[in-house]
Amino acid sequence: MERELTCIICPRGCRMKVALEGKEVVSVEGNACPRGKTYAVTECTNPHRTVTSTVRCEDGSVLPVKTETTIAKADMEKCMREINAAVAKLPVSIGDVILSDVCGTRVIATANKNA
Ligand code: SF4
């Protein structure tokens, strides 16, 4: 099986062809540097994503948040359950930690919000 991917590691956006045997990557073509191959292998074997969402605040408003690092795509549902169950205490500044341990990362605020 072959997959076509666009590398998202830098703005050059190399188009890559990834050959797979079952779930194993056997070759990567089209990457201009080794980071592209690493991205392609990860994307085909254990894809990761940054989760962006909102958390309810104690005053009923909502606060935009995101995971501080990427998490395994397979963990996104679990991460969203924890985000949906959270309530942020105000005030909050950009970068404040809203959840300290979700799927191996932290969930942080991406906006300021006053009490
Ligand atoms: S393969 Fe290298 S040069 Fe190409 S987009 Fe990815 S990081 Fe950039």
Image (cartoon, rainbow, N blue to C red):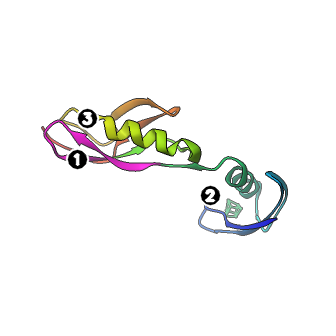
Q: Label 1 sits on what residue type?
A: Val
Badge 3 crowding class, 10 Å Cα cut-off, few under 14, some 14 to 19, many 20 or more, is some
Confirm if mark 2 falls within 8 A of ligand 1: yes
**Residue bearing mark 2:** 9
Q: Are marks 2 and 3 in contact (CB under 8 Å)?
A: no
Q: Quadrant of residue 19?
A: bottom right
Task: Identify the residue at the far top of this view.
Answer: 100
Image quarter where the N terminus lies is bottom right
Helix, strand or loop at label 1? It is: strand
The residue identified by callout 1 is: 62
The picture places residue 63, in percent across and down from the top left corner, at 26, 46
Look at the numbered disc 3 and give the secondary structure of its residue: strand
Task: Classify 33 as above or below 98.
Answer: below
Please name which of the two marks, 2 or 1, marks the residue nearer to the observer: 1
Q: Residue at x 76, y 56 (%)?
A: 37
Determine which quarter of the picture holds residue 75.
Answer: top right
**C-alpha distance separating marks 2 and 1:** 31 Å
Please rate how many residues cluster around mark 1, counting C-alpha atoms within 10 Å: few if below 14, some from 14 to 19, many from 20: some
Q: Which residues are magenta?
A: 51-64
Q: Earlier along the polypeptide chain: callout 1 or callout 3?
A: 1
Q: Which residue is under mark 3?
A: 87
Determine whether, in the image, residue 26 is placed left or right of residue 99: right
Residue 15 lies, in percent from the top left, at 71, 71
Judge left or right: residue 97 versus residue 68: left
What amino acid type should be assigned to the residue bearing mark 2?
Ile
